[in-house]
């Protein structure tokens, strides 16, 4: 499809080295494949696992998984890189990373409040492939292709086989013309699909055009590639990206099992190039919906220089009810992180509101209220404190920095 134009062109340099786990997996399941081939991101894309026969070589499918794959009516196709397949538990269909990429029959059920475009992105799209919801920034959908398809994908209506053809150079031209004509746009987020699945040359062509627009101050890349295809983060890619600073990257991480030596090397390579890295994690039932798992993920991300940024409530995309938790679960997790670990490890818990309302932060209630000239708070341990904040006080009023514990 046109969205894949340039996908397999260009020269690959600077392989991400394979861990012992992936070397063993390669030897067992892809005999005869060299270490250089395994570490080549193009080989990984070319050899993605996309059908029942391919996945059954690697894991023992449950009856439900086999039924979902065999019927052929899942909205989103199966696709995962051999590298990411090496993380799957062969015999456990409830393993967290396995559940995120292998279809189940629950995907065919549309539950209360679900829709194909829950965030109303199509409504806020002034030209094809561009979403302009917030005043100073736009979402630029570059491609409909991903190296791995997450089963809870918000854009399943337009990626893979379901509309990926709409992304092409003509669509890019219209989106760029719109940005050029709207001077309030200072921030462009490239997403998709996944922009890092494109070749260096194709991605650079887009970055260079955006960087020539005077009012575009920063460019962001939204991607899951470093987590599912770390081999893509080559020295040549990083060298190219460095030319377009200020450039930021938001990476989709789901579970601590994704934090492999390969991912560590890829993220450190990006960070060494001066690219600020942030994580975006979706809260998923039975996958990462407990404090210990989330804390391990956030601590692991900090160790590879990825700053936890957003924890998303799972969007009500059609067929996603088996992934969604109550909102109270997200509040419980934030409460279990705040104060119990460094603030750098506490992401912003947000709901991207249905119908195009945008992201709304959801926090535990720490503000209790006011008592005369004091504001009353509860800290992370549930202790009550009061802070001096005189009603109607001017700048000349005394201010005390220390709060007093209310016993």
Image (cartoon, rainbow, N blue to C red):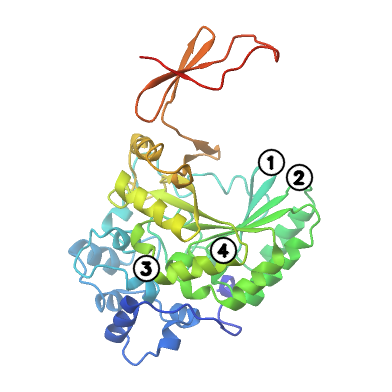
Q: Report which residue position mark 1 lands on.
A: 135
Q: Report which residue position mark 4 lands on.
A: 271
Q: Report which residue position mark 3 lands on.
A: 78
Q: Is residue 9 left or right of residue 291?
A: right
What's the residue at 76%, 45% (across, down)?
A: 184
What's the residue at 42%, 26% (across, down)?
A: 365
What's the residue at 46%, 55% (across, down)?
A: 302
Kindly state the secondary structure of the residue where label 2 is placed.
loop
Report x, y in % for residue 321: 33, 46
Mark pair 1, 3: CA separation: 36 Å
Q: Is residue 323 above or below residue 190?
A: above
Marks 2,1: beta carbons within 8 A: yes
Mark pair 2, 4: CA separation: 29 Å
Which of the two labelled residues, at mark 1 and mark 3, occupies the earlier sequence position? 3
Residues 315 and 201: in front is: 201
Q: Report which residue position mark 2 lands on.
A: 184
Which of the two labelled residues, at mark 2 and mark 4, occupies the earlier sequence position? 2
Q: Is residue 348 left or right of residue 272?
A: left
Q: Quadrant of the C terminus?
A: top left
Counting every numbered tag in the picture gives 4
Which of the two labelled residues, at mark 3 and mark 2, occupies the earlier sequence position? 3
Q: Nearer the viewer, mark 1 or mark 4?
A: 4
Q: Is residue 334 left or right of residue 390?
A: left
Marks 2,4: beta carbons within 8 A: no
Residue 79 showing in the rendered view: no
């Amino acid at each position: 499809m046109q969205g894949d134009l340039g996908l397999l062109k260009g020269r690959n340099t600077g392989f991400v080295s394979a861990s012992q786990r992936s070397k063993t997996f390669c030897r067992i399941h892809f005999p005869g494949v060299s270490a250089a081939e395994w570490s080549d991101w193009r080989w990984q894309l070319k050899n993605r696992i996309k059908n029942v026969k391919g996945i059954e070589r690697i894991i023992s499918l449950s009856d439900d998984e086999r039924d979902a794959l065999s019927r052929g009516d899942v909205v989103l196709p199966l696709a995962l890189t051999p590298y990411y397949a090496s993380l799957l538990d062969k015999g456990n269909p409830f393993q967290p990373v396995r559940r995120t990429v292998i279809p189940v029959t629950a995907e065919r059920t549309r539950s209360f409040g679900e829709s194909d475009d829950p965030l109303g992105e199509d409504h806020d799209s002034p030209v094809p492939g561009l979403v302009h919801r917030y005043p100073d920034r736009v979402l630029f959908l570059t491609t409909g292709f991903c190296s791995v398809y997450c089963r809870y994908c918000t854009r399943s209506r337009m990626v893979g086989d379901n509309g990926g053809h709409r992304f092409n150079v003509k669509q890019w031209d219209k989106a760029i013309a719109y940005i050029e004509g709207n001077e309030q746009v200072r921030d462009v987020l490239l997403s998709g699909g996944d922009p890092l699945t494109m070749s260096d040359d194709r991605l650079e062509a887009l970055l260079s055009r955006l960087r020539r627009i005077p009012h575009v101050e920063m460019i962001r890349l939204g991607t899951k590639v470093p987590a599912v295809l770390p081999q893509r983060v080559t020295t040549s890619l990083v060298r190219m990206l460095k030319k377009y600073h200020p450039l930021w990257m938001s990476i989709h991480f789901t579970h601590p099992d994704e934090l492999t030596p390969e991912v560590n090397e890829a993220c450190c390579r990006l960070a060494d190039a001066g690219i600020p890295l942030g994580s975006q994690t979706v809260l998923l039932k039975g996958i990462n919906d407990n404090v210990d798992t989330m804390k391990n993920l956030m601590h692991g991300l900090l160790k590879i220089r990825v700053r936890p940024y957003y924890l998303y409530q799972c969007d009500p995309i059609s067929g996603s009810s088996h992934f969604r938790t109550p909102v109270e679960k997200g509040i419980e997790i934030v409460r279990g992180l705040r104060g119990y670990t460094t603030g750098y490890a506490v992401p912003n818990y947000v709901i991207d509101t249905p119908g195009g309302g945008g992201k709304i932060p959801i926090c535990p209630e720490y503000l209790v209220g006011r008592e005369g000239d004091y504001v009353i708070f509860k800290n992370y341990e549930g202790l009550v404190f009061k802070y001096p904040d005189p009603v109607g006080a001017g700048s000349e009023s005394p201010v005390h920095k220390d709060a007093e514990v209310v016993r």
